[in-house]
Structure formats: C-alpha cells, structure tokens
Image: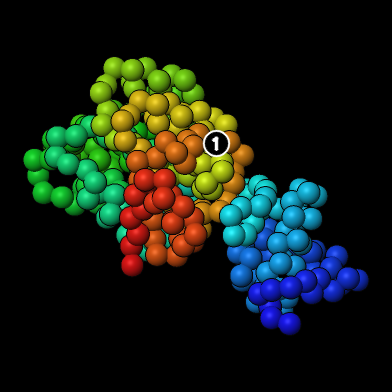
Amino acid sequence: MSPTSGDDSGGAFADERQMEIARYVEEYGRARVTELADRFGVSMVTIRKDLDVLADRGRVMRTHGGAIAPRVRRQDLTYAVRDQMQREEKSAIGTLAAAQVADGESIIIDASTTGLYLARELMHRGAGQSLTIVTNSIRIASELAIRPDIGVLLMGGRVRGRSLSLVGQLGDAVLERVNVHKAFVGAGGFTLEEGLTETTEEEAQIKRAMVDAVREVYAIVDSSKWGRVASATFCPAEALTGVITDAAAPDDMVEQLEGKGIKVTQHG
C-alpha cells in the first residue's frame, strides 16, 4: 500500500505511534503530515487520524498540513542566553529589516535580541539619517545614544532584568505623544492561529501598545520561532505588514501569509 493513501493505522501499534508523534511535535514545535508519514512509514491518511486523536487529547494543535505544539514550554531565557542563539540568522534579519527604514522616519524597535541586530545595522549607516527610534530596550538605547543623527526615546516602566527591557503601562505615554511610522517586533513564538506571542504577559502588554501605535508592523522572527506558541498573544497575524525571517521558515506558513497579502522577506 502506498504511504500516501489508504489506512494502515496498525491497530495495536496506533497508541505507541501517537505517543511518538506527540513527542516529536513537542521537541520540534511543529511537524508536517508528509514528514510524519515518511518518518513512521504509514499513509498520510493515518497520520491525519493520529493528529486528530492527539488534538482531541490536547497533545497537539492541528494546522493546515500538520500540527504544532499546543504551548511552548521553553523557560523565560535571559537576554544573554537568547543573544547567543541563531546569531547568524538574526544578523541577516537585522540587515533585511534595516532596508525597510528610510531616512527621517520614526520607528519602534522592541527589546528582542533580533531588534538589537537591526539597531546595529542602523548604526553602521552613514551620517545624516535623522531617525527617531522609540524602544523599551536598555541595551538598544545605550548603543544608539552615541549617534547624534539618531534620536532615542526610551519608554518608561519597570526594569525587567531577564530581558533588559522596560515593561508596564508607564511606557504608553511616549507612544501617545510621538507619531511613529513602523514597528519592528520580535516574538517568543509565531503561528497563523495565535499570531505573535510572548513568554510573559507584561512583555506582551507593552508590545501590544507598540503595535497599536503604528501604521506598519514588521515581525522580525527567525525560523526557530515559527510554529511555536508562547503564553500571551500581542499581535494577530492579520495585523502584520510584513514578516522578515530566514530561509528555514516553513514553506506552508510562508505561502499562507503571502496568500493573505502579508509580505515575507527571507534571507538566503
């Protein structure tokens, strides 16, 4: 029987296979029906049935063409640890994001580690940019402060040491007084269903304010965040102007985003 048609669920072995599928999705954050069929040597019909069973049990979330983990169980990693992860991808994303910034604009850059690479790319530009950058990142503000042609507005709030960010509603006052063109925001997770998500509600709260304050929102998320869901949504996928990522972003999600009119820019 072809692995792409028919029902070869294996009866007594179905439970064991479903447990393995659940572990695989949990480990990698997402999986496609086609890759699971190849991995377990069964048909796509069988895999779809397995995923439906696992979804009913709350072990996975079904998506078009596959499944994702219901919640990312990654700990709230410190800024220093996150800065060591996917550095090449983040640097490339920063370069692509900087191409979306025109001289004279006012933009928001959040406290994500990918946002720091965008800020550094802007630092490397020639003089005379006349940019205004609003941020809740202590690290970004300190690095950009030496450039006389880049005005930096640091949002107020409580200092959150793990992310070197300022959080809380005190930062909203800055956004109410400045006309900002674009926001560039990272995320702990990104799916079509849940949108951009963060690991804590306080980080999500300030990012919601950023998203609400601008006309254009760009997600700057490397491929490790795609298909993952963190605890708090701050921007639905439909609200995005564009997504800037690397070449390993899943093709099916990219196609669906572009089908919604959301531009996806990839490095490599």
Q: Residues within 10 Å of mark 1 (few under 14, many from 20)?
A: many
Q: Which x, y percent locates residue 94?
A: 31, 53
Q: Which x, y percent locates residue 235?
A: 47, 35
Q: Give the image quarter of residue 149.
A: top left
The residue at 41%/45% (across/down) is 260
Q: Element type at marker 1?
A: strand
**Residue 80 visible somewhere in the drawing:** no
**Residue 65 visible somewhere in the drawing:** yes
Looking at the picture, does residue 21 appear above or below residue 227? below
User: So how many labels did they put on this image?
Assistant: 1
**Quarter of the figure with the C terminus:** bottom left
The residue at 40%/22% (across/down) is 171
Q: Which residue is mark 1?
A: 233
Looking at the picture, does residue 225 appear above or below residue 212? below
Q: How is the image coloured?
A: rainbow
Q: Which x, y percent locates residue 5?
A: 69, 73
Q: What is the three-letter code of the residue carrying label 1? A: Thr
The residue at 91%/71% (across/down) is 12
The residue at 15%/50% (across/down) is 125
**Quarter of the figure with the N terminus:** bottom right
Tell me if 264 is positioned left or right of 229 in this view. Answer: left
Residue 157 vs residue 107, the one in the foreground: 107
Residue 136 vs residue 106, the one in the foreground: 106
Looking at the picture, does residue 256 appear above or below residue 170? below
Q: Residue furthest bottom?
A: 1
Q: Which x, y percent locates residue 105?
A: 19, 34
Q: Residue furthest right?
A: 12
